[in-house]
Image: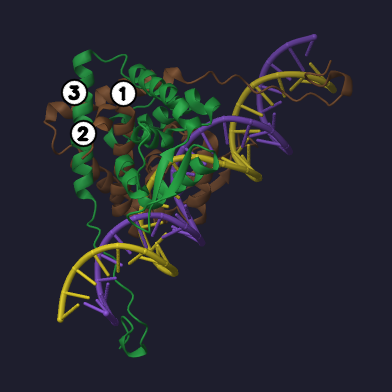
Chain colours: A brown, B green, C yellow, D purple
Amino acid sequence: MPLERTLSAGYMTNWAARLFAVAIERRLKARGLSSAHLPVFFALADGAARTQKDLAAAAAVEQPTMAATLARMERDGLIRRAPDPADGRSSLVSLTETALADVDAVRRATDEVNALALADLAPSERDIFLSLLEKVVTALAADAPEKPPRAARRKATASTADGSP
Amino acid sequence: MPLERTLSAGYMTNWAARLFAVAIERRLKARGLSSAHLPVFFALADGAARTQKDLAAAAAVEQPTMAATLARMERDGLIRRAPDPADGRSSLVSLTETALADVDAVRRATDEVNALALADLAPSERDIFLSLLEKVVTALAADAPEKPPRAARRKATASTADGSP
DNA sequence: ATGATTTACATAGCTTACTATGTAAATCGA
DNA sequence: TCGATTTACATAGTAAGCTATGTAAATCAT
């Protein structure tokens, strides 16, 4: 059925990623958990408290994406935030008792889905698959544009407004 | 920096898929095109007219996902719909002249991103990567639950309403 | 020490994806 | 042939991702 598309790494990777997400969610939905929660769970599974920036880096998502994920997890009673004594701009995020009680189930679900996905690969192929994926991620990440520090907005003074003559 | 996560096929696949999408969009944004348009472009590149159901199958997305993609593409002047003479429920979707003029650029962008992503793989590894991805997709697709035909809603008759005693 | 810059997070707006369900046309079965 | 079912699409609602940008705290440079 699928013909030419199986020749495109991008198409196949996107397809596989969506199937992974559906498979995970099918197993975790009853607990109110979802695929975007996984990196947060793993980063905080030992009871640690981390900043949003830290969690975004651990999940390799942008900051507003992690902000939205944490907002939903807080709404659903999975995380709590405490003020960061070292930095007034940050909070320290940790899992609630409820969420900590689900950590084992989360790990079982991810192990199960990963095993299922790789079931038709020989053991040596599984390592190869992961190492090729890592090379692909590295190459694509290098393609992303630099993110220079944002220009500071200077005190609005008509004569110095950026771009004005 | 990333350590344990590189051991999860699901995590790495999701990460790679997001990087693929960003890379494609960086190259096509100026033309008002995006990654979800690609399967539609390729399916209709020869001027063919196809139904929404056909396109959803070609893209391996659910019907409402394709409906939304086509709605945006129609809004942006990329596709047009004509009534299907053979079936009053369907339309036949085809690319506009504008979109047809972009087909070559779309193919160049996808080729470029795929080549970039696989640049650090040996030629033989590229084939292996695609074949492993195909096995993963097949295994995960087999995990998905059956989609039985939807129950017909019978004429509401109090005594026969589903679940009523 | 203070003004400028950078950083951490919040918010707005959009796309892509999913599930669930409504509606009308087509098809099936008795 | 006609009622029931199935199919094709539409719509509603939500999640998860992105970019762009606002704001306040922290830091830097003079």
Q: Nearer the viewer, residue A50 or A155?
A: A155
Quadrant position of residue A32: bottom left
The kind of residue tagged 3 is Ile
Task: Give the chain letter at badge 3.
Answer: B
Q: Give residue A92's position: percent from left, percent from top.
A: 53, 41
Question: Is label 1 in a helix, a strand or a loop?
Answer: helix
Residue sitting at x 30%, y 14%: B120
Quadrant position of residue B107: top left
State the quadrant of the C terminus of chain A: top right
Reading the image, the residue beneath label 2 is: B134
Quadrant position of residue B12: top left
Q: Give residue A54's position: percent from left, percent from top.
A: 49, 33
Asked if residue B28 is positioned above or below residue C16 in the image, the reply reads above
Residue sitting at x 31%, y 38%: A15
Is any atom of residue A21 visible in this view?
A: no
Q: Residues within 10 Å of mark 3 (few under 14, many from 20)?
A: some
Residue sitting at x 56%, y 46%: A82
Is any atom of residue A102 visible in this view?
A: yes
The kind of residue tagged 2 is Glu
Task: Name the mark nearer the viewer: 3 or 1.
Answer: 3
Q: Nearer the viewer, residue A14 or A123?
A: A14
The kind of residue tagged 1 is Glu
Q: Same chain for labels 3 and 2? Say yes or no.
A: yes
In the picture, the disc for residue B128 is: 3
Q: CA distance from mark 2 to mark 1?
A: 17 Å
Question: Is label 2 in a helix, a strand or a loop?
Answer: helix
Reading the image, the residue beneath label 1 is: A134
N-terminal-most mark, 3 or 2: 3
Task: Give the chain letter at badge 1.
Answer: A
Q: Give residue D7's position: percent from left, percent from top.
A: 28, 59
Q: Give residue C12's position: percent from left, percent from top.
A: 65, 45
Asked if residue A29 is positioned above or below residue C13 in the image, the reply reads below
